[in-house]
Amino acid sequence: MTLIFILAGLLIIWLLVQLWPVPSLTYVHSKEWDPLDDRWSNVKILDVRDSSEYWLSHIPDSINISIGRLPVVWHKELSPHNEVIIFSRNWLTRRKAARILARRGFYQLYAVKGCFLSVNRKGESCEHKYCY
């Protein structure tokens, strides 16, 4: 019986950690995020899905570092001074990536909510619809 209480307590703690807000993460609605807008021209686009999913459909000019490799190889492509917008398959992975980057000194992190038709920075539209 004690083991059940311990496991339930650990589950509650895990849920609280997952739901706790990341201070440096700002959510942007898909209608507000336009890669052609000058506001987003210097923002690095980070896609934390696996490479197989990334190559099936991805946002042009995005950086792919899977969530498992992010703690180790982030410094090859990103700097803590960069503004980074995070894309993933679900909100849990997005928050996990934001926590990893925030622990490493990133303070300007963004995530897009909703679906959008991808348009790259040259103004060319893509045929895939991305929902994250």
Image (cartoon, rainbow, N blue to C red):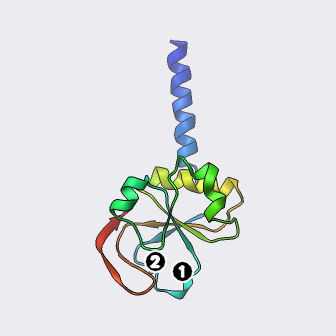
Dot 2, how many residues are within 10 Å of its Cα: few (below 14), some (14-19), or many (20+)? some
Give the residue type at disc 2: Trp
Tell me if I can see residue 114 in this picture: yes
Front-most of residues 25 and 65: 65
- Find disc 1 in the rendering and name its residue: 40
Q: Quadrant of residue 43?
A: bottom right
Is 18 displayed left or right of 23 in the figure? left
The mark nearer the N terminus, 1 or 2, is 2
Looking at the rendered image, the disc whose residue lies closer to the viewer, 1 or 2, is 1
Give the residue type at disc 1: Trp
Tell me if I can see residue 22 in this picture: no
Q: Is residue 11 above or below residue 34?
A: above
Q: Residue 97 in the image: x percent, y percent?
A: 56, 54
Q: Quadrant of residue 31?
A: bottom left
Q: Contact, CB < 8 Å: mark 1 with mark 2?
A: yes
Q: Is residue 15 above or below residue 53?
A: above
Marking on residue 111 = none
Q: Residue furthest left?
A: 127
Q: Secondary structure at mark 1?
A: helix
- Residue at the location (40% across, 59% down)? 54
- Residue at the location (56% across, 21% down)? 6
Marking on residue 33 = 2
Q: Residue 112 in the image: x percent, y percent?
A: 46, 67
Is 101 displayed left or right of 54 in the figure? right
